[in-house]
Image (cartoon, rainbow, N blue to C red):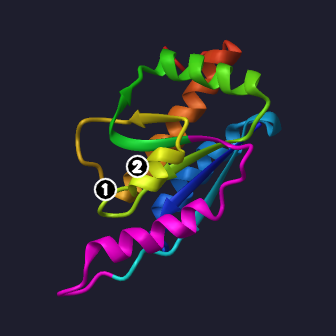
Amino acid sequence: MKLKVLAVGQKMPAWVNEGVEEYAKRLPGDFRLLIEEVAPGPRYAGADAARAITKESQALLGRIRPQDHVVALDVQGKSWSSEKLAQRAQDWRMLGQDVVLLIGGPDGLSAECLARANERWSLSPLTLPHPLVRIVLAEQLYRAWTLMSGHPYHR
């Protein structure tokens, strides 16, 4: 199973890429984490945010295959403990599909992206900066794998 993160935003600081890579390299080949960046829609004074969201949405949806299981990161989604995430990840493995996790832009995900999602997950009720979301997500996926594997990382 591949875990593919589709994230709006490009040119992350080095510390973000290093943090994500640190957790991604710890994962085994059958639980591989990939990050694909999507260019943010244009945002400038007087610009319509809906146009930016539409552009981002088209780019995200264009990278999702019909057979992918899609999880949208959304503040309105369900909040999962690390143990619940491990259970969800085990369920994803049983599906026999790759999992695509969507991280929206500054204005969130479009209604079309949310409709395409098989489930919605809220990392936190807090508003987190997008670079930090990537690292938290990578760490939690690694933690879920350690729980599934009986690794002592989660104590």
Whole-percent x, y for residue 59 in the image:
56, 69
Magenta segment: does it hold 61? yes
Type of the residue with mark 2 = Val
Determine which residue is flagged by label 2. 133
Residue 12 appears in the picture as rendered: no
- To which quarter of the image does residue 86 belong? top right
Q: Nearer the viewer, residue 16 or 33?
A: 33
Magenta-highlighted residues: 43-70
Query: Which residue sits furthest bottom?
Result: 45
| Amino acid marked by disc 1 | Pro
Q: Residue at x 44, y 47 (%)?
A: 114
Q: CA distance from mark 1 to mark 2?
A: 6 Å
Which residue in the structure is indicated by mark 1? 129
Q: Quadrant of residue 38?
A: bottom right
Asked whether the beta carbons under mark 1 and mark 2 sit within 8 Å of each other, the answer is yes
Secondary structure at badge 2 equals helix
Quarter location, residue 75: top left
Left-right relation of 139 to 132:
right
Q: Is residue 62 above or below residue 20?
A: below
Q: Is residue 59 visible?
A: yes
